[in-house]
Image: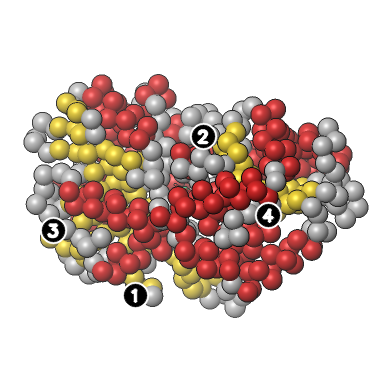
Amino acid sequence: MSHSANLVIVANRLPVDRVTLDDGTTEWRRSPGGLVSALDPVMRANDGTWIGWPGGTDGDMEPFEDDGLHLVPMSLTQDDVEEFYEGMSNGTLWPIYHDVVAKPEFHREWWDRYVSVNQRFAEKAAEVAAREATVWVHDYQLQLVPQMLRELRPDLRIGFYLHIPFPPQELFQQLPWRRQILEGLLGADLVGFQLAGGAANFVRLVRQRVGHKTHRDLIYLPDGRTVRAAAFPISIDTAGFEELARSEGVQERAKEIREALGNPRKVFLGIDRLDYTKGIYARLRAYAELLQDGHFDVEDAVFVQVATPSRERVEQYRILRDEIDRLVGRINGDLGRIGSPAISYMHSSFPREEMAALYRAADIMVVTPYRDGMNLVAKEYVACRYDDQGALVLSEFAGASDELRQAWLVNPYDINGMKSALLQAYRATERETTRRMRAMRKTIITHDVAAWARGFLEGLAGAGSSHAKQVRP
Ligand code: G6P
């Protein structure tokens, strides 16, 4: 399938997961993420191809089609997984880019492996992209791909989008390979960020560290190319979520969930990947203190916390899991009663339908990361509240807080502040929650993931000085 695709998506993960069935056979299932549904129409309109890792270390796999999408699996060896994925991507870059909430580790072998895996992704993209095609590279695992790809295929139009925050200079500077990363990204014609602040951090670093001239969102390279750095806040398939939430199955299930919880007056909900950036520990502590202080009782309210297993072989994630297990155990031991735990905790991942039912069942959605690129859970909750009901408590350090201004905004480092926001949301009148929810719904209905993809691809078509073809956004 060489030199055929007019649009190539390059991401660490493929948009499908390999699942093993009861009889031992395997099949591909579409990942629940919104990125897939956003890019689906553009992929089809442009004969698109998606390059990514299918998870695991099962060795080479042939490209295949899934429901009309061309997918090219990239295999990773055990060493690649340990040094490129768990090491450099999630033990170094992830914590640095998230305000050093956990301590990053620096290992030269991890970096070497990051370079070699990025090179393989770039080579694969060079192989499948048609002449003057558009290649859209995603996220922190693949920051060297734009430059590597440009060297192999100068005819291409190359975009890069970072899904996580781009850190301030003071933190980015710690990286022993800071210059290589900046230069890797500068291979793109357009570098997209969640927020304007991330784009500004990047431009400033390029000016100071690499020495290129810059003007506002433009960077002028010595070879005459221009690179643009701008914000494109990502979103969700708003209409799709609302439709799901309105379905009979989901409504029934939401009722069932509330009954199973003992029909308390208020249901609080947290849904996160089990990640130290998400602020799960502090949030549960704040909630427990409200019970302790006697503001309400375990018969009045319950906190449902879903923590999706994630990066389980990375040490920081193991430590976090133990800490949360212990905290939940202690809170329930101290405050729970028979049939009424304070916290209903699940360490598992659920399909979209169950997520929608949980959103429908929850009166107060609690999203309190210390740092988060966007946080799509907050937007999904809003999308599912077509009744204009439900309160959102949201960290000011989630990208989503830029748009969802009418949430109860909190600083997750301030436990008293969080307690007071949770209590306000608990006590809010219907009028108050409706006023806020309506305003937030307006925002995400117009700004959905399709608008995001269109915005980026239009920006990419207009960026750079290359003469590559344009894709139909
Ligand atoms: C974040 C990152 C994605 C990543 C996802 C899941 O959203 O921005 O690039 O795919 O987390 O993490 P995982 O390590 O399982 O791919």
CA gap between label 1 and label 2 equals: 38 Å
CA gap between label 2 and label 4 equals: 22 Å
Q: Nearer the viewer, mark 3 or mark 2?
A: 2
| Of the image marks 3 and 2, the number of the one nearer the N terminus | 2
Position in image of residue 272 (x %, y %): 59, 48
* Residue 245 placement: quadrant: bottom right
Name the residue located 48 percent from the left edge and 34 percent from the top edge. Answer: 98
Establish if 88 lies above or below 302.
Answer: above
Q: Which residue is mark 2?
A: 397
Q: What's under tag 1, amino acid-wise?
A: Gly
Q: What's under tag 2, amino acid-wise?
A: Phe
Position in image of residue 330 (x %, y %): 81, 39
Q: What's under tag 4, amino acid-wise?
A: Ala
- Quarter of the image with the N terminus is bottom left
Q: Nearer the viewer, mark 4 or mark 3?
A: 4
Q: Nearer the viewer, mark 4 or mark 1?
A: 4
Report helix, strand or loop for mark 1. Answer: loop
- Quarter of the image with the C terminus is bottom left
* Number of the label disc, if any, that sits on residue 68: 1
